[in-house]
Each structure stands twice: as structure tokens, then as C-alpha cells.
Amino acid sequence: MLAEKVETAPVNDADHRASFFRQSGWLMIANVAGGALMWLVHFLSNKLHEGEYATFGVMLAVVMCVPTMPLSMVLAQQTAKARATGRERELAGIIRLVWLGTSAVWLVASVVVLLQQRMILERWHIASPVALWLMLGACLFSLWLPLFSGVLQGQQNFLWLGWSMMLNGVGRLAVAALAVFALGGYATGMLLGVLLGVAVAAAIALWQTHSLWRLPAAPFDWRNLLAQVLPLMAGFAAFQFLFTADTMFVKAYFTGDATDAYVGAGTLSRALMWLVGPLAAVMFPRLVHAAAKSEKSGLMRGVLLGTLVLAVGGALGLWLFGPLVVKLVYPARFAAVTLSVLPWYAWAMVPLALANVLLNNLMAHGSFRIVPVLIALALGYVFVLTRFHESLVTVLKVLGVFSLLLLGACAWFTFHHSKTVGGRAEPARS
């Protein structure tokens, strides 16, 4: 009886907060360290021929547009819910199904890309098809990595999730440096580093989650699963598109040093998400677990405040110290252009970081009414960028406006809108 009481006793608020900050602190260290190692790859831009850094940037942007966030969030949500309700065998079947499905989608997409190879190479001003082939390989592992890292996140196994992030950066930097110095100043060497880095990270996540995905599968409710998965996929995919698509548009509309400069500013500015992203990553499975057990949580407001402080501080840091970093890392031929767009880029990331927290909260509680709005914003973003791209600053102004619109939509659905649960309307929980 005593053991039973101890096992079911609720964790007090102090322990809960201590656990949250310990886990998010470790994940922040791992995320920043892994991100810094990936960023150090960009020091190799000094060794690349003209235009090759832009080729690397656009290939990397395509890899970043792989729906890593929706895949990770879906598996994190399903894992957290399965652990809360004792349905691990159903989860095993879901994991294997998603694994097979994403691999099949990659195969079809790769065939289409290879059939259109010449047109893609001409449109993006890419000299070697090898860069395209390496990108496809990196996309495959980029589909597998979020699947299994999402399971790690749902298990709240943040120790190995952090190691996966850091070793991804180690592999990318080591292989890219070796390839660039051995093979010459071409983007293919850096892309080889991306490929092997993400492959190592995916292997770690596979190894650490095998006790779940190797379980005998149990039947699961298809309709209920799709009702949860499809809105999550669409919502997070729209967010990820708003976060990453600008580089591909810039590569299509600009050439030479302008695209190199833009990629450089984007690399520094997106580092803000490395800094603040772990707070939302640790928050999400906790909120899913609490929602599955009908427990209330006030975690989101604290995470939102922490994200605001860190994101604004990071943007100010880039504004003040960006000139020193840019001159240290990037070649003189495009450093001045990078400095001119860096403040615009950095401040556009702040509302995106805040929107990420609010969106994670909404998705964790199954509040999916925002999803059509997110899709409309993504489509509107494409339309506006195809009409307004006279300069790099214009592109970033468009990104900034849509980032604010996204934040406004997430705030409205979080604090003012209502959602229906079990046939009755109640405010979205925060």
C-alpha cells in the first residue's frame, strides 16, 4: 500500500519546475553546441569558389524544408499519449507504418527530382548534379531523424535527444572540413558532411528507441489517428515552411554574392531558434501527457516569457556584435551585404520563436482550429514573395510581416478563441 501511494503521488510544483529547467537546460546546451558545430561549417565558405556557398545554402534549405517539425511533433505527441495511457504496442505499429510511409514518399519524390534534374540545376544555377544527389540522401535521413527523435522527445529521453543533436554537428563539421580541403572548394564536400551528420544522428535515435518500435504491434483506431495526425502535420508543416522557405526564393531570384550574403545572414539569425527551441521541445510532451490525463498545467506562460527574453536578447546580440562575427566568418566580397540584412533577419526570427511556443501549446491540447489559418498564411507568403522580391531587404520585410501575422494568429487562438472538447466549448488551456 505504501509503495502504491508513493508511486501514484503527484510530483509537487517545485520538483516539476526543477525537472523542467534541468531537462530544458541540458537540451539548450546540446542544441546550442550542435548548432554551433553546424554553424562552424560555414567558416568553410572562405574556401569555396564563387557561387558554391549559395549552392550549399539552397541545398541545405531544401533539407530544412523536409517536414522534420511535423513528423517530430506527431511522434512526440503519439508517444507521450501512449505512455500516459499504456498503449505502447499500438504506438509500435504507428511508428513502423510512418517509417515505411515516409520512405515510400522519399522514393517517389527522388524519382521526380531526378527526372527534372536538368531543369532544377539550371533554375538554381548549380554546376554539379552530385550536390543534388547528396541532398536527396540527406533528405532521406532527415525524414527518419525526426520520426525517431520525436519518439525520444515523447519518452522525455532528453539525454539521448541532446547527444543526437550534438553528434549531428560533430559529424557534419568533421566530414565537411575533410571533404572541402581534400576535394577542393565545392559545395558537394559540405553537403557530404550534412548527409553523414544527419545519418549519425538518426542512427542514435533508432538505437535508443528500439525497445518501442520493435514491440509486437497492436491494432489501432485509424480514424482517430488521422484526426490527430493530419492537423498536426499540416500545422507544423506550415510553420516550418514560413521558417525556411525564404532562402529558396532568394536563390531563384538572385545570383552570385547576393545569395551568399543572404545565406550567411540567415545562418546567424536562425541560431536564435537553437537557443530558444529547447524550451518548447521540453514543454510539448509534458503538455500532451497532462492533456491525456486531463491535468491542468501553467507551464506555457513561463516558457513564453523565457522565450521572449532569450529571443530579444539574442537579436540584440546579433545587432550589436554581428559586424564582428560576420567579418570573422565570411569573405569580404559579401560581408557588407550580410551586415546590411542581418538586423532585418534577426528581428524577423523573434515573432517566429514566440509563435513556436504558442503553436506547440495549441497542438499539444488538440486545438486544431488554427490549422486552416496557418495554411492560408503559408500560401499567402508564397504569393507575396513571388510578387515582391526587388531586394533582399524586401524579402525580409515580407518574412517579418508574415512572422507577425503568424504570432498574432497563434496568440488569438491561445488567449481569445475557444475550442470544443467533448461537445462543449471551453477556453484553450495554457
Image (tube, rainbow, N blue to C red):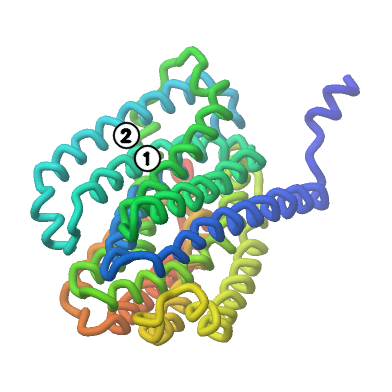
Residue at image point 51% right, 62% down: 40
Residue at image point 17% right, 64% down: 125
> In the rendered image, which quarter contains the C terminus?
bottom right
Residue at the disc numbered 2 = 102
Instruction: Tell me where residue 148 appears, x and y as whole percent.
Output: 48, 35
Identify residue type, mark 1: Leu
Q: Nearer the viewer, residue 106 or 52?
A: 52
Residue at image point 28% right, 83% down: 394
Residue at image point 35% right, 76% down: 261
- Left-right relation of 191 to 40: left
Residue at the disc numbered 1 = 143
Dot 1: what SS? helix
> In the rendered image, which quarter contains the N terminus?
top right
Instruction: Tell me where residue 429 appears, x and y as whole percent.
Output: 57, 55
- Left-right relation of 351 to 310: left
Instruction: Tell me where residue 178 appears, x and y as whole percent.
Output: 45, 50
- Binning the other alpha carbons within 10 Å of mark 1 as few (below 14), some (14 to 19) or many (20 upward) gives many
Identify residue type, mark 2: Thr
Q: Is residue 227 above or below residue 184?
A: above
* Residue furthest top as drawn: 216
Q: CA distance from mark 1 to mark 2?
A: 7 Å
Q: Is residue 137 above or below residue 343?
A: above
Q: On the image, which quarter does residue 163 sit in?
A: top right
Instruction: Tell me where residue 414 appears, x and y as whole percent.
Output: 50, 62
Q: Is residue 307 above or below residue 396?
A: above
Q: Is there any visible trace of residue 312 in the rendered image?
A: yes
Q: Earlier in the sequence, mark 1 or mark 2?
A: 2
Do tag 1 and tag 2 residues touch (Cβ < 8 Å)? yes
